Image (cartoon, grey):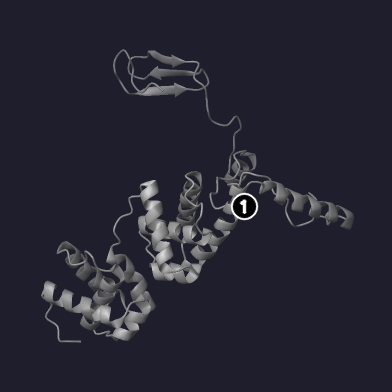
Amino acid sequence: MVDKCPDCKSDKLVKDYEKGEIMCKNCGLIVADNVVDTGPEWRAFDSEQRDKRARGGAPIKYMRPNKGLVTEIDQYNRDIRGAKISSKKQAQLYRMRKWHKRASIASSMERNLSIALSELDRVASYLGLPDAVRESAALLYRKCIEKGLIRGRLIESVVAAVLYAICRETGKPRTLDEIADLAGIEKKEIGRTYRFISHELGLRVPLTDPSQYVPRLTAALKLSGQVQEKAIELLKKAVSKGLVSGRGPTGVAAAAVYIASALAGERKTQKEIADAAGVTEVTIRNRYRELKRELGLKIADL
């Protein structure tokens, strides 16, 4: 598409779809003719008419094995007027649904996707992940299938590894322990699969920021927004001084929440915070001493 007038170099162009022309508003030159109108041939005067007349169909859903692009026979057993159909027709529709389902999952890849995506949806639901994260995880799993990375590996371990990677990419981190408990797979197996997928697909997963765990921790411990802000402020200082490198982000976040809760007068015990963060009390004590020493915090021993 032309964006400037070749004569006067003006970018003030007017499109006339009735004549199929693009004209320069400055000098009147016909810049292009026989322009095709790519919009719909119908008009709509409200949102209801627009929805009824649109023929675009639903968007692609990677969470469905067929991406949501096939026809489905519903379960309502009613005709177009809403009246209940006869038992003979119901039996015919039942057989049609059964064979339609069998025909839509014909290859081994489609069967694998059907199992994996249902497992992905289950784990993501328990983790409280939004639809956008699930779609990204489903797309990454499809890439693993295309590259042949799932051969010889448990479907559940690949699903768990994919979810772990996408959670880190989208800034909604979940710990390996959380995912391992829900998926029923050992933490080491998920970590091994995650490293293999990252290497083969060239994933550039950012380092987890400990402050991303703070809102979840403060919400679980029923602490105020003041504690959350103070903990994030402490973690920003810790990151700038390189105190987080080589340490588990959940442990550092738990120690920051521990300090912030004491400073705000909403003190929680190490055991309470350790249980909420999924770390040990020893980890919190070690990270607490490091933060206190390196950041020069003047607080009484907790």
Q: Taking 74 as reference, is 49 left or right?
A: left
- The location of residue 103, given as percent across then percent down, is 71, 46
Q: Taking 79 as reference, is 233 left or right?
A: left
Circle 1 SS class:
helix
Q: What amino acid type should be assigned to the residue bearing mark 1?
A: Arg
Determine whether 254 is above or below 36 in the image.
below
Total marks in image: 1
Q: Residue at x 43, y 63 (%)?
A: 190
Whether residue 82 appears in this view of the structure is no
Q: Taking 229 as reference, is 118 left or right?
A: right
Q: Residue at x 10, y 75 (%)?
A: 296
Asked whether 277 or 53 is in front, the reply is: 277
Q: Which residue is mark 1?
A: 111
- The location of residue 9, given as percent across then percent down, is 29, 18
Q: Taking 81 as reference, is 105 left or right?
A: left
Q: Residue at x 60, y 54 (%)?
A: 114
Whether residue 217 appears in this view of the structure is yes
Quadrant of the rendered image containing residue 217: bottom left
- Quick one: quadrant of the C terminus? bottom left
Q: Residue at x 32, y 18 (%)?
A: 26
